[in-house]
Amino acid sequence: MLATLEQLRETVHNLEKRTQFLTKQAQAHLNEAAALKATDKPAALLEMKRHVLKMKEVEGLINTQASLEAQMLALESASITSGVVSSVQAGHKTQKALAKNLDPEAVAQLQENVSEQMDALNEVNRTLGLQLGDPMDDAELMRQLDELTATTTPMPATAAAPVVVVVGALDDSEQLRALEADILGSLPAVPALVPMPVVPTAAPGKSPTHVGDKDDDDETLAALAREMEM
């Protein structure tokens, strides 16, 4: 089609040049006839006939050129229409190929598979978040705490700083042991034992073997009294 259009354009171009050439000749004949009108009428009439013939040929060329131009326009329009149709066909083929991957059942199956994978992933996350080992019972832990606090000697009013207990669930045995250590650490220290003086085993009126005098016994009793007051 492109070759045909190119050929028509070349033909129209040649017709335009021919039309211009004949138009100039016709105008020359007309001018000559006007110049010979007063002096040589037969020659003037001959020039007029030539003018008319050339103008008729020019008119035919103009009509032919118009027909060729109309044909060129029709071919160009057909070419554009053909391109549009080809584009529509190509788009239809592409859309049809894409529609194979957009099957409603396949899309529904794909959605179901994605949902199953997400559920499996959530299940794995929940499993990883579970506590390892035996679960701790909050009620049992509180019972053990009550037993520990009931069997522990109460602190004096002027004892060490009170124990701060954080309210919340105890998750493992480490927190329980830490709480026991805090309670036991807050209790007052037990005073160290002081050795008692040696009781005489000899009979009354006799001095026992390796026993100190009366002054040594008094000093020992006084030291024991001071230790008990602390």
Image (cartoon, rainbow, N blue to C red):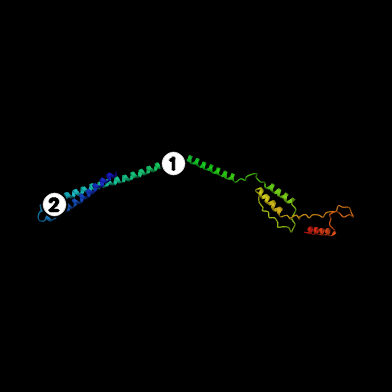
The reply, left or right, for residue 6 in relation to residue 26 is right
Residue found 24% across the figure and 47% down from its top: 10
| Lower position in the chain sequence, tag 1 or tag 2 | 2
Q: Position of residue 157 (x, y in %)?
A: 74, 58
Q: Nearer the viewer, residue 213 or 120?
A: 213
Q: Position of residue 137 (x, y in %)?
A: 67, 46
User: Disc 1 marks which residue?
Assistant: 99
In the orientation shown, which residue stands out farthest toward the front?
209
Mark identifier at residue 21? none
Mark identifier at residue 47? 2
In the orientation shown, which residue stands out farthest toward the right?
205
Task: Name the quarter where the C terminus is drawn.
Answer: bottom right
Q: Nearer the viewer, residue 208 or 146?
A: 208
Q: Amino acid at mark 1?
A: Ala
Q: Secondary structure at mark 1?
A: helix
Residue found 34% across the figure and 44% down from its top: 83
Q: Position of residue 32 (x, y in %)?
A: 13, 54
Q: Nearer the viewer, residue 45 or 108?
A: 108
Determine the image quadrant of residue 121: top right
Task: Report crowding for label 1: few under 14, some 14 to 19, many 20 or more residues within 10 A (C-alpha).
Answer: few
The reply, left or right, for residue 154 in relation to residue 39 is right
Q: Position of residue 103 (x, y in %)?
A: 46, 40
